[in-house]
Image (cartoon, rainbow, N blue to C red):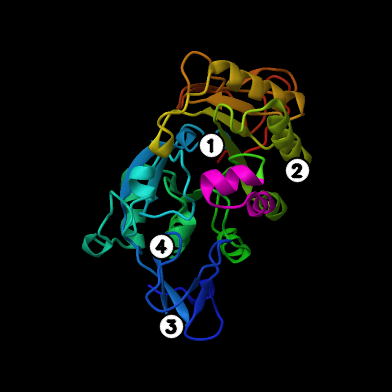
Amino acid sequence: MVWRCGVSPVAKPTAVCNLCHHHCALVPGQIGRCGVRQGAGDVVKSLVYGKLVAESVDPVEKKPLFHVLPGTLTYSIATPGCNFRCSHCQNSSISQVVGAASPRRINLRTMVERTAQDVVDAALASGCKSISYTYVEPTVFFEFAYDCAVLAKQQGLGNIFVSNGYMSNTVLDLLTPVLTSINIDLKAWSESFYEKVCGARLAPVVENIRKCVELGLWLEVTTLLIPGMNDSTQELTEIAMFLAGLGTDIPWHVTAFYPAYKMEGARATPLATLLKARQIGLDCGLKYVYSGNISGGQETSTRCPMCGHMLLKRSNFTLEQNLLVGGKCPSCSAGIAGVWG
C-alpha cells in the first residue's frame, strides 16, 4: 500500500516519510524508525496495511476516554510497530516487534491482511459504537486507520485515536473530519525524558495538543507517572497549567506505572503520587482530573464542576450510573463538556 500524501520527494531515489515528526528519509528498501514503513523510490509504502496484530472489544473508558459515549463499547485494533521506543512500554509485545534486532520479531509477510470493511463489519457485529486505533501508535498504520475511519463514519460509527501525539500536520488535518475524539499521551514535561526514554521530542507533542484544541477535536490527555522520572510537583504543575491554559474542560488522566519492558526493575507508582497529581490538576483549574490504574484510590467518576453532583459513576472501566440529561447536570443544569451521543 502506497500513500503518496504521506511522502515528500527529495533527491531521488530518496523519499521522506511525512506521517510523523521523525520525517525519516528512506532510500529504496530502507525501513523507517517505526519498523513498518519502507522507502520505494520516491514514495514510502506501508508494510502493515490491514495486518492486525490485535483486535478487541473494550469499554470506551479503557482508552481512557471518560467524556466520550460513556458506557459504550469500542472496537480496538492495532498493527505491529511504533514510532517511539519507550523503555517502559506497556504494549512492547506488539509495538517493539519489528526489525532484525527485535527479540520478539513478527514476520509481517506471513500475517493475514484484513480489509477496512472487515473491521467495520466486526465492530458493528460486536455492538460497538466506535472503532479505536490504539495499543501502538496508530500513525504508523495511518493508511489503514484512515480507510477504516472513513467507512466507519459512513456507517454511523465513531472513530477514536489513542496516540503519542507525534503525527504530522498532514495526518492531523486529514484525520480531523473523521475523528470523534483523540487521547494523547503527554508522557512528561521535559525534552530529556522524551529523548532518553522515548526516543522522541516533547515539542511536537505539545504543538499537536494545541492544534487538536484549535481544530475543535474532543481531546483527553493521559500522563503515566513514573516514580522519580516525571512525577515532581514542578513538572506536574507545568503540565496542568499548560492544559488549563488551553481549556479547563480538558480531562486529564494521571495513571499508575507498573514495571515493564526495559524498566522491569523500576518502582510502581504509589497511590500518594496519583492523589498529589490529581490535586495539582484541580488546583490549577482543570475541572476533570482522573486518577487510575491502581487499586484502592482511583478517582474515576465524573462530578459536576459547578455543584459537585455525581454525574457518571464508574468502577474501574465500568460505567455504573449515567445521570447526565442532554449533556447537562440534572441538579444545576450546568453543561458538561464531552461527546455524549
Secondary structure state at the residue bearing disc 2:
helix
From the image, state whether disc 3 or disc 4 is nearer to you. Answer: 3
- Which quarter of the rendered picture does the N terminus lie within? bottom left
- Which quarter of the rendered picture does the C terminus lie within? top right
Looking at the image, tell me whether mark 3 or mark 4 is earlier in sequence order: 3
Secondary structure state at the residue bearing disc 4:
helix
Q: Is residue 160 left or right of residue 334?
A: left
The amino acid type of the residue labelled 2 equals Leu
Compute the Cα span from label 1 to label 4: 22 Å
Looking at the image, tell me whether mark 1 or mark 4 is earlier in sequence order: 1
The amino acid type of the residue labelled 3 equals Gly
- Does 218 appear above or below 291? below
Label 3 sits on residue:
41
**Image spot of residue 17 (x, y percent):** 51, 70
Q: Count residues near mark 3 (Cα–Cα under 10 Å), then give few for <14, some for 14-19, many for 20+.
A: some
Secondary structure state at the residue bearing disc 1:
loop
Q: Which residues are magenta?
A: 191-208
* Res. 299 image quadrant: top right
The amino acid type of the residue labelled 4 equals Phe
Which of the labelled discs sits on residue 65, or is there none?
1
Can residue 195 be found in the magenta stretch? Answer: yes
* Res. 245 image quadrant: top right
Q: Count residues near mark 2 (Cα–Cα under 10 Å), then give few for <14, some for 14-19, many for 20+.
A: few
| Residue 261 showing in the rendered view | yes
Compute the Cα span from label 3 to label 4: 21 Å
In terms of depth relative to the viewer, which is nearer, 288 or 328?
Answer: 288
Looking at the image, tell me whether mark 3 or mark 2 is earlier in sequence order: 3
Label 2 sits on residue:
246
Compute the Cα span from label 2 to label 4: 31 Å
The amino acid type of the residue labelled 1 equals Leu
